[in-house]
Image (cartoon, rainbow, N blue to C red):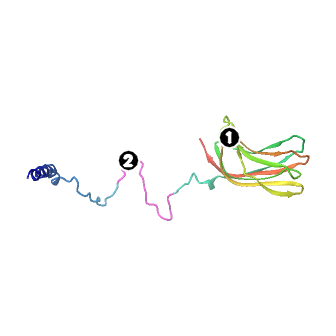
Amino acid sequence: MKRFNRYLSKATCCAILLLPLAFTDVGQAVAAPAASNVNVVNTPTVIVGNTPSTPLPVFDVDNPASQPFQESAQFTMAGGVSPIFSTISDITVVPAGKMLVIEHVTFIGGTGPSGAKMFAGISTSISIVAPEKNHFLVLTEQGVIFDNTVFTASQPMRLYAGPGTTVRGNAFRSPDSLGEGPGEFSISGHFVDVP
C-alpha cells in the first residue's frame, strides 16, 4: 500500500506540473507560415525577376580556366670533369598581383653517355622575401637516345609561386661526363588574383 501511495503522489506531482502546458502552445507543432509577399523597403530598389532573355550575370572568379598558364624552358648541361653537375633554368617570373598555381610539371633530360644518373625539381617561393623551396620530380629512365641516357617525368603537383617571384627548374646529374646534357622543363596551371 505504501508503494502505491508513493506512485500516486509522484503521478499527482507530474500532473500538476504538466497541467499548465495543456493550456499553452508550447510543445504544439508549428505550422508552416502561409505564403506571403516579401517587400524590400531599403534603397536602392532591388529587382529580381530576370527573364531567359535577360539572365542574371554570374561570375565564377575562382575558375582555373579563367586565367590559364603554361611555360617551358630548355637547358643544356655543359660537359665537365666535376663529380656532380647541375643547371638552373628560369622558367617564368610571376606578374605583380598574381599567384601562380602550378598543377602539372613535365621534364625531359639527357645525361650524356650512358651510366650517369639524374634528378630534377622545380623551385618556387610564395613571396619575394621568402626562401625558395625545391620540389623534386619522380624521374624514369627511358634508355639511351643519340648517346644520351634520357630521363623523363610527367607529374601532377600543387605548387604556389607568389607575385614577382621566379619559378626555376633544377637538374642534377652524377657522375658528370664530357658530353652535353640537353633537357626541358614545362609547367602548366593558372593564375589567381591577389591583393
Residue nearest the observer in this picture, 156 or 68: 156
Residue at the spot of label 2: 42
Please indicate whether residue 60 sits to the left or right of residue 71 in the image.
left
In the rendering, at what x and y percent does residue 64 appear? Answer: 62, 54
Please indicate whether residue 143 sits to the left or right of residue 23 in the image.
right
Residue extending furthest toward the left:
1
Say whether disc 2 or disc 1 marks the residue closer to the N-terminus: 2
Give the distance between the C-alpha atoms of the residues marked 2 and 1, in whole angstroms: 48 Å
Which part of the image, by quadrant, shows the C terminus? top right
Estimate how packed mark 1 is, as few (under 14), some (14 to 19) or many (20 or more) residues with alpha carbons within 10 Å: many
In the rendering, at what x and y percent does residue 178 appear? Answer: 91, 46
Kindly identify the residue that appears in the image at 87 percent across and 40 percent down.
82
Residue at the spot of label 1: 125
Residue nearest the observer in this picture, 146 or 66: 146
Q: Which residues are magenta?
A: 39-56
Kindly identify the residue that appears in the image at 65 percent across and 40 percent down.
126
Residue nearest the observer in this picture, 58 or 54: 58
Residue 45 in the magenta stretch? The answer is: yes
Looking at the rendered structure, the kind of residue marked 1 is: Ser
